[in-house]
């Protein structure tokens, strides 16, 4: 069929487009400010992209329109529609659907779906799980909200059944987002996926633009729990009271726990070097380059989920020894004059704190680095952070950094006032240029500059490397 995707350059929709193309469909799409890297990736596989949401695209006459959740019925100041193509689709009465629904009905039907949900760590855990299954020879399909370094792509169909039932196809691993599906379907995306294995990694308040409170998100997580069959498995973080409340609403599947001292899957040791204990038995030691307790927990979740498709915990540990982290997860961007620059996706206060803690542990564990300072450079860019719903948590999230630099552009709240409890440790800048100047002025050899944002952050990583030493920068 021919499908035309509105909002095709988003991480999820771009991955869906690649899967649809691989499955043999003709795929076209549009977006505002068609942008790389997704635009380059899509064009490289033969997908035609159109700039903007003009109503003239109705002339393409695809078999179905797939609507991304960036699209709405919003109006501009002059009363005209922000998305004229959507209005034309509605007026014409032609078939349309959401990305998650199309994916579930066309590509996931009959396959063993392993879905990874949680406020934090979805992309990393999904990537770990996909790599474990790949290492075990299962050739899984996957859709990840990032680019797993072990694969170099964000989505693939995986091994498909040839001449047999779809149930004989390889498992499919998917990042299961709790954000809403589309303007016409306000349920979380993950309710469409019908997983047999569901990871509930953690659960905190987030997405203040669509959820009123934590209880509203817990209800959506329980909608996911309701879809898991009695022969399925829930892999649940035993440290999270919010997840305990979700299960108390009703549970009809096997539950396997991780994280708490008394759990089915436990880690013994430091996050970079620990023994994995499954059902009271040591199954393997995992020594790797990843840092932070959060990644230790992500690993346990992936190991427990992989066991449900007959990959032994020992084999899963062996696979993770060769795991390469996802891009933009503590990604080393360059070193210049003894100053190291990292890029990380952290944007929620808890994610910021765990990322800084992870780097602090890494520095403390390496004698050559133990004297290094952490300069945390962050951008409150998500809708939740822009609204200021969790602004009071920022001093807590940054307390292990030696200095903190905040980009305040576009915020509806006073970052100087919010960060005042940090005293001289916090700096605020209204522009990226000013932020770069502040960081470069403060930085000294041995420092570790940790840039955190869920956006491009104005290319600050390359700008910092260039400004620190234009002639000597060694980017990686």
Image (tube, rainbow, N blue to C red):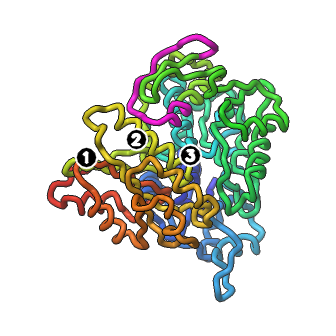
Image coordinates of residue 43 in percent, x first then y, are 44, 57
Q: Mark 3–mark 1 contact, CB under 8 Å? A: no
SS class, disc 3? helix
**Residue 351 x, y percent position in the rendering:** 53, 47
For marks 3 and 1, give the one nearer the viewer. 1
Q: Nearer the viewer, mark 3 or mark 2?
A: 2
Crowding at mark 1 (Cα within 10 Å: few <14, some 14-19, many 20+): some
The residue that mark 1 highlights is: 446
How many numbered discs?
A: 3
Mark before the other along the chain sequence, 3 or 1? 3
- Residue 214: where, in percent of width, then height? 73, 51
- Mark 1 to mark 2 CA distance (whole Å): 14 Å
Is 376 within the magenta? Answer: no
Q: In the rendered image, is residue 355 in sight?
A: yes
The residues bearing labels 3 and 2 have C-alpha atoms spaced at a distance of 35 Å
Decide if residue 124 is on the left or right side of residue 328: right
- What is the magenta range? 278-298
Q: Which residue is mark 2?
A: 359
In the image, 73 versus 451, the foreground residue is: 451
Judge whether residue 129 can be spotted in this image: no
Classify residue 85 as left or right of residue 353.
right
Looking at this rendering, what residue extends furthest in the bottom direction?
A: 78
* 21 sits left or right of 357 in the view: right
Residue 456, labelled with which disc?
none
Using the image, determine if residue 209 lies above or below residue 358: below
User: Foreground: 254 or 141?
Assistant: 254
First-in-chain label (3 vs 2): 3
* Coordinates of residue 315 in the picture (x, y in percent): 51, 17
Q: Residue furthest left?
A: 471
Of marks 1 and 2, which one's residue comes earlier in the chain? 2
Query: Label 3 belongs to which residue?
Result: 19
Whole-angstrom CA distance, mark 3 to mark 1, is 44 Å
């Amino acid at each position: 069929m021919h499908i035309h995707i509105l909002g095709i350059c988003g991480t999820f929709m771009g991955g869906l487009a690649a899967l649809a193309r691989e499955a043999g469909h003709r795929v076209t799409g549009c977006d505002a400010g068609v942008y790389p890297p997704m635009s380059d990736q899509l064009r490289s596989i033969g997908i035609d992209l159109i700039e903007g949401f003009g109503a003239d695209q109705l002339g393409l006459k695809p078999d179905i329109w797939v609507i991304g959740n960036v699209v709405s019925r919003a109006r501009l100041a002059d009363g005209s529609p922000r998305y004229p193509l959507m209005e034309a689709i509605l007026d014409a009465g032609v078939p349309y659907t959401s990305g998650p629904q199309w994916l579930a009905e066309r590509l996931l039907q009959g396959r063993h779906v392993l879905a990874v949900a949680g406020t934090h760590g979805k992309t990393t855990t999904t990537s770990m799980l996909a790599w474990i299954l790949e290492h075990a020879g299962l050739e899984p399909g996957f859709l990840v909200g990032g680019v797993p370094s072990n694969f170099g792509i964000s989505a693939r169909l995986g091994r498909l059944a040839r001449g047999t039932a779809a149930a004989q196809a390889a498992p499919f691993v998917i990042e299961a987002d709790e954000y809403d599906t589309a303007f016409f379907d306000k349920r979380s995306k993950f309710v469409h996926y019908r997983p047999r294995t569901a990871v509930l990694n953690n659960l905190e308040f987030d997405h203040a633009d669509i959820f009123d409170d934590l209880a509203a998100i817990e209800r959506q997580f329980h909608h996911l729990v309701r879809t898991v069959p009695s022969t399925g498995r829930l892999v649940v973080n035993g440290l999270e009271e919010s997840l305990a409340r979700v299960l108390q609403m009703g549970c009809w599947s096997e539950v396997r726990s991780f994280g708490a001292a008394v759990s089915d899957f436990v880690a013994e040791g430091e996050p970079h070097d620990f023994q994995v204990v499954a059902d009271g038995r040591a199954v393997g030691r995992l020594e790797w380059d990843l840092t932070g307790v959060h990644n230790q927990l992500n690993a346990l979740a992936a190991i427990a989920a992989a066991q449900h498709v007959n990959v032994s915990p020992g084999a899963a540990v062996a696979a993770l020894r060769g795991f390469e982290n996802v891009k933009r997860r503590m990604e080393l961007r360059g070193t210049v004059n003894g100053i190291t620059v990292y890029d990380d996706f952290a944007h929620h206060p808890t994610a910021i704190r765990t990322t800084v803690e992870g780097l602090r542990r890494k520095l403390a564990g390496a004698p050559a680095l133990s004297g290094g300072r952490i300069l945390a450079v962050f951008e409150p860019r998500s809708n939740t952070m822009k609204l200021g719903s969790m602004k009071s948590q920022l001093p807590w999230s940054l307390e292990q950094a030696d200095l903190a630099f905040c980009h305040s552009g576009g915020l509806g709240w006073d970052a100087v006032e919010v960060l005042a409890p940090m005293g001289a440790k916090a700096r605020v800048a209204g522009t990226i240029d000013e932020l770069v100047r502040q960081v470069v002025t403060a930085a000294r050899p041995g420092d570790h500059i940790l840039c955190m944002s869920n956006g491009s952050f104005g290319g600050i990583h390359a700008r910092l490397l260039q400004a620190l030493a234009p002639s000597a920068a060694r980017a990686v």
